[in-house]
Image (spheres, rainbow, N blue to C red):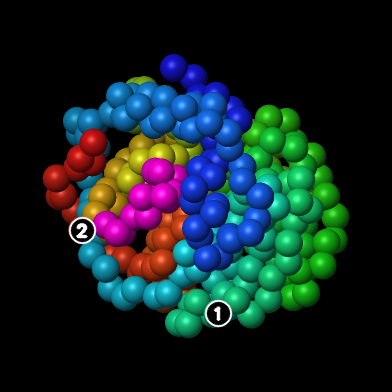
Amino acid sequence: MALPPLARRHLPESFMRTSSALVARRPFVSWTGKCLLALSALSLHLQAPAADAGIPVYTVKVVKAYPHDRGAFTEGLFFKDGFLFESTGLKGHSTVRKVNLETGEVVLDTSLPSEIFGEGITHWGDRIIGLTWTDGIGYVLDGGTFKMWRKFSYSGEGWGITQNGRELIMSDGTPELRFIDPVSFKETRRVRVTAGGKPVEKLNELEWVDGEVLANIWQTDRIARIDPASGKVTGWIDLTGLMPERNPQAQGEDVPNGIAYDAKTKRLFVTGKLWPKLFEVQLVKGGLGPRR
Ligand SMILES: [Ca+2]
């Protein structure tokens, strides 16, 4: 069953009333929206594949836990020059932040226009490049001041974005990854992501890690390791149980989302929407696989 597009990433009114970080801000969904959310969750549960035969499954070992703003509806994450850079979503709450890894302190931030639902971010030179969910508009910020530098357009939805040093790589909720020229912002090619020959839907936050693409799969505890040339999933990273104290008022929206990599020290960081923690993790091969 296809997801009702307007049900995606909305939060229940009860959560909006009680979250200290989001208090006094307007609710997002109606009773109908809640029903759609419940149906969506049921649909995703039924569709979630078991571990694919022949594709290695990794669990994670926590190296260190760091504080994370539990009011941050994380949509984008990367690490650069000693700092985390994070984008958050939801209309009226979409931001881009520069964050002190050790303390979680936001040292610089900017808000997107209230009608915009912010999505993933990545860096290119001294710029930050970001996507929006359904507006078909990307934006470029000065990485030092967060001042808007320019905008660009693309077709379809924007979900996650990363870069490989030559191209931007973008997800849009489908099984396809788009490769984008970082100067002209024109699409140069696409690759279809598959696992065991089957397309992998809902690729979300992305990270380029030593020649492969890591992608959160929306509304699951899984990260796909993707060969960017063939699109084949070469491994699954199972984050089940990493953040057991989920917020029940978030009604399942507080899923893993956000992968950052410090290539210099080879540190891998993961977090989730509205999570109070961000984790440095190491992969452990041979786990039990996604327990869905
Ligand atoms: Ca990322």
Question: In the visual, does 45 lie left or right of 151?
Answer: left
Question: In the visual, does 258 lie left or right of 115?
Answer: left
Question: In the visual, does 243 lie left or right of 182?
Answer: left
Give the residue furthest to the top. Answer: 1
The residue under label 2 is: 284
| Disc 2 CB within 8 Å of nearest ligand 1 atom | no
Residue 19 screen position, x and y as percent: 50, 60
Vertical position of residue 92 compared to residue 101: above or below: above
In depth, the one of 131 and 124 nearer the eye is 131
Residue 5, visible in the rendered structure: yes
Mark sitting earlier along the chain (2/1):
1
Amino acid bearing label 2: Val
The residue under label 1 is: 105
Choose mark 2 or mark 1, whichever is in front: 1
Task: State which quadrant residue 253 falls in.
Answer: top left
In depth, the one of 28 and 152 nearer the eye is 28
Q: Residue at x 77, y 62 (%)?
A: 141
Q: Which residues are magenta?
A: 243-257
Q: Quadrant of the N terminus?
A: top left
Question: In the visual, does 109 lie left or right of 41?
Answer: right
Q: Quadrant of the C terminus?
A: top left
In depth, the one of 245 and 159 nearer the eye is 245
Task: State which quadrant residue 94 falls in.
Answer: bottom right
Vertical position of residue 12 compared to residue 54: above or below: below
Residue 70 screen position, x and y as percent: 47, 64
Helix, strand or loop at label 2? It is: strand
